[in-house]
Image (spheres, grey):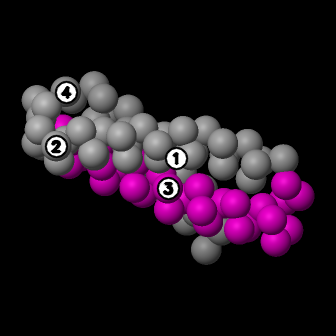
Amino acid sequence: MDTFNLILVIAHVAGGLGTLVLGPMAMVARKGGKRHVDWGRIYYRVMMWVLFSAVVLSITKRFVFFLVAVTVLSFCSTFTGVRCIY
């Protein structure tokens, strides 16, 4: 594995772990409160990073449709939640 892909995989995994931590933090905060909004915004941005890194990894390495589909559908649910606010 070349250096670029190794760094991207590490960053992708770190982003995924970040969403696993940030998601429950946003869920347990009072809805509409400052903490809920702040954690939700950070969660959304980290999910965008996970989507971007997954797509780049699937292009630079071998393409696995199932993994890309799981990533896109996970981000789609996050995006739908944000769009419902506006």
Label 1 crowd bin: few (<14), some (14–19), many (20+), radius 10 Å = few
Question: Which amino acid, mark 4?
Answer: Val
User: Residue 31 at x, y = what percent?
Assistant: 84, 60
Q: CA distance from mark 3 to mark 2?
A: 22 Å
Question: Which amino acid, mark 1?
Answer: Ser
User: Residue 46 at x, y = what percent?
Assistant: 49, 55
Question: Which amino acid, mark 3?
Answer: Val
Q: Disc 3 designates what residue?
A: 46
Q: Disc 4 designates what residue?
A: 64
| Quadrant assignment, res 57 | top left
Q: Disc 1 designates what residue?
A: 77
Q: Disc 2 designates what residue?
A: 3
Q: Is residue 13 left or right of residue 32?
A: left
Earlier in the chain: of badge 2 and badge 1, it is: 2
Residue 60, disc: none
Earlier in the chain: of badge 3 and badge 2, it is: 2
Q: Is residue 58 left or right of residue 37?
A: left
Quick one: which residue is furthest to the right in this view? 30
- Tag 3 secondary structure: helix
Earlier in the chain: of badge 3 and badge 1, it is: 3
Name the one closer to the observer, 54 or 4: 4
Residue 57 higher or lower than 37, as above or below:
above
Residue 32 higher or lower than 54, as above or below:
below
Question: Which amino acid, mark 2?
Answer: Thr
| Quadrant assignment, res 12 | top left
- Let me know if residue 4 appears in the view: yes
Q: CA distance from mark 3 to mark 1?
A: 14 Å
Label 2 crowd bin: few (<14), some (14–19), many (20+), radius 10 Å = few
Q: Which residues are magenta?
A: 29-58
Magenta stretch holds residue 42 = yes
Label 4 crowd bin: few (<14), some (14–19), many (20+), radius 10 Å = few
